[in-house]
Structures are given as structure tokens and as C-alpha cells.
Image (cartoon, grey):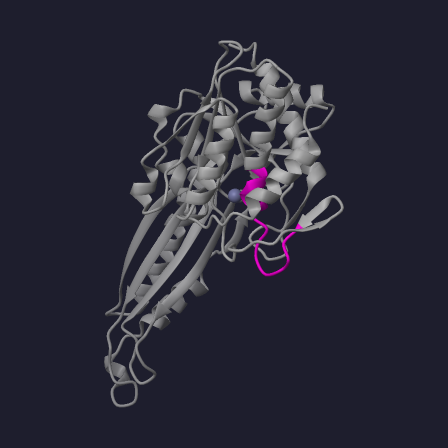
Amino acid sequence: MPIREDRLRDLFLDLVRIDSLSRREGAIAQRLAAELLKLGASVEFDEAGTAVGGEVGNLIAHLHGTTSAEPLLLCAHMDTVEPGAGVKPVIDGDVIRSDGTTVLGGDDKSGVAIVLECLRACQEDGLPHPPVEVVFTICEELGLLGARHLDLGRVRARRGLVFDSDAAGFVFTRAPGSTLVEVVVRGRAAHAGMAPERGVSAIRVAADAIAGMRLGRIDEETTANWGTIAGGRAINIIPDEVRLRGEARSHDLAKLQAQLDHIRQCFDDAVARHPGASIEMRLEEMYQPMSVGDDAPIMQLLLAAAAQAGRTVASAGMGGGCDANILNQRGLQVVNLGTGMRDIHTTNEWLKVSDMVAAAEVTLALVTLAADRT
Ligand SMILES: [Zn+2]
């Protein structure tokens, strides 16, 4: 088999031992650049690092094709979440886990390792491949910042794969769009013991609004959540200000808008019931929904590749957002192939090497099939 399990595993173990918290991707970027240069790729960095206050920008590598077929994008992110410094991977047969004090960083070093192993296998076995563009992004975990600031002028490919989801054997083609919601509720301060009737409690107004609000799972495609709430000054002061931060997500933009309208209505109604109160609401689109059909060229290629590799890959929807949302929004056609990472963003994170191998085999088949697609 061209994909070499031992080499993939060893590379993965090397990569997770290199600290790469968001905005501190300098060391891992250096290592990945060296790997790509060894493969004969040209490597550059864009200005995204400056834009987000990080050590380094997005890594963009170009590998000449053996044919002049349409270029193919392979994308994963370099950063990992906290606690993610000093990862000590523990190997237990096919399973690699963290030692329980940090995340493993399989999110997303499994994706990075799969991309590199595919390119190595391609070169070693002299397999045909189209021009390949590798993008390793920064700061995905901070709200897809690297992909947002990716200099697309440096990327020719308009279709490809992102490797950043858990379920092995699945490709995520649908993901919700997400909007950040910030609300400031203002009331009026007064002494809580001597003159409570002169005050308007911002906490009460907020509670009143939230009590009647649809939250959690709204329907199959839509969710909403308040993540943080902060306000008040002291126990003897009627609170004059409360700040809430939350989000709404939906695969359907009309449903997302309906939920945002509902949230605003709940606050407006609450304000009307509490004379003297007011609200300020700010919305920020985090990313748009993505939806790539099974009949899209990239999916046709992927399904053919899975068949050729003797693997099954099923398309699915996911509840989170990733770089693929931004790339699709920016005009590319990409889908998100599962790498086998499990229990991500926890100190119990683990994965199976055999799942990474399966994803790498499908990817390698896709790369070779793409060599004669124009
Ligand atoms: Zn990730």
C-alpha cells in the first residue's frame, strides 16, 4: 500500500509534540514548511498572521502536477485548543491518546499528517497527480480567523478537501451558518435597601426576556444559546447594566433570521414591561451555512475515490463550523473529510491510527483520480 501507516503515525506523533496554540503556530509552521520543501513544493506565508496578531500567517504550498489538470486544494489547520502545550501522546496499539493533562491535538494534526503522508506516497510511488495546493491555516479555533484572512490571490485551486472533523468514513458537506449575538440591557441604578422603587433592574429585564425565549435546539436545523452573562455592581445596588453574549445557528438562513428576530422581540417585549429599561443589540455574522450536493464535482470525485480505495464515505451534516464554511462562502467548493479524531477539545482526546490511514487512502485515490480531471 502506498500509504505507510508507520510513517503516518510517526509524523502525527512528531506534530502533536510541537506546541501550536492559536496565534503561536510559528514552530509547527516551520516544521511543515520543511516537510513540504522536501517534497519539492514551493512554500509561502500570507499576511494573516499580522492581521490577527499571531506569530505566522497561513502556510500556502504549491506542488507542480504531473498533469495540467485543475488544481486541487488540501486544507487543515495548524492551531490547537487549550490545554494544548506540552502534549505527551500515549500509544496503546492502534489508539493514540493524550496523557490526560492536555488535549491530544488530533484536531487538527490528524488532518495535517494525512495531507503530508498523501503527498509523500504520491511522490515515492510516482503516482499521477494534478497541481496540488496545500493550505495550513492559523487560528481556526479562534473563529476561523486564518481562513477569513487567507490571501486567496495566492491560491489557484477552487475545489478540494478540508480535513477537520471527527467521524471517520464521513464527509461533512453541510454545516450551519452562525451569528454572534451581543445584548446590553440597561436599567437604572438605585440603592437596593433605601430606594429600590427608583431603580430598574437590568438583571430582571434580561431574565424576563430570556424566560420566554426559544433556546437550545429550535428545530432540526437551528440552535440558539446564551454563552455568557455579566452585570451588576454590588449586592446593595439595583443593577443598571447586564451584558449577554450568545449565538444562533442554522443550516437555513431564513430560519436563522427568524430566530434572531425572535430574540430581539423577546427583549423588546421585556423592555416594554419595564419602563426605564433599554437594550442595545449587536449581531455579527460568524460564517454562512455551507451545503455541497452529492452531485457536485468534488463529491463525485470523492465518492469515486472511496470506491477505488475500497472504503465507504457517506455525506453528512454537522452542527459546527470550520474553515470549509469560510472557503465555500468565499467561492471555493470544499467538503470536510473526517480524520478519526475523537473527543476533541477535551483532555480525553484520542484517535485510531487505522482511521487516519483510511482517510489518507481515500485522499490519495482522490488525488490520483484528479490527475486527469480538467
Ligand atoms: Zn479543528
Residue with the most extreme bottom position? 194
Magenta region includes residue 106? yes
Please identify the quadrant where the N terminus is shown.
top right
What residue range appears in magenta? 97-111
Residue at point 45% right, 65% down?
211
In the depicted structure, whether residue 97 falls above or below residue 231: above
In the depicted structure, whether residue 244 falls above or below residue 366: below
In the depicted structure, whether residue 157 falls above or below residue 114: above
Magenta region includes residue 312? no
Question: 331 or 33, which lies in front?
Answer: 33
Report which quarter residue 297 is drawn in.
top right
Report which quarter residue 204 is drawn in.
bottom left
Please state the horizontal and vertical placement of residue 180, each as a whole percent of the image: 38, 50
- Can the viewer see residue 260 in this picture? yes
Please state the horizontal and vertical placement of residue 250, each as a whole percent of the image: 48, 42
Residue at point 33% right, 58% down?
183
Question: In the image, is 202 to the left or to the right of 369?
Answer: left
- Can the viewer see residue 324 in this picture? no
Please state the horizontal and vertical placement of residue 209, each as a whole percent of the image: 39, 63
Residue at point 51% right, 27% down?
38
Residue with the most extreme right position? 93
Please state the horizontal and vertical placement of residue 344, each as a whole percent of the image: 58, 50
Residue at point 34% right, 56% down?
182
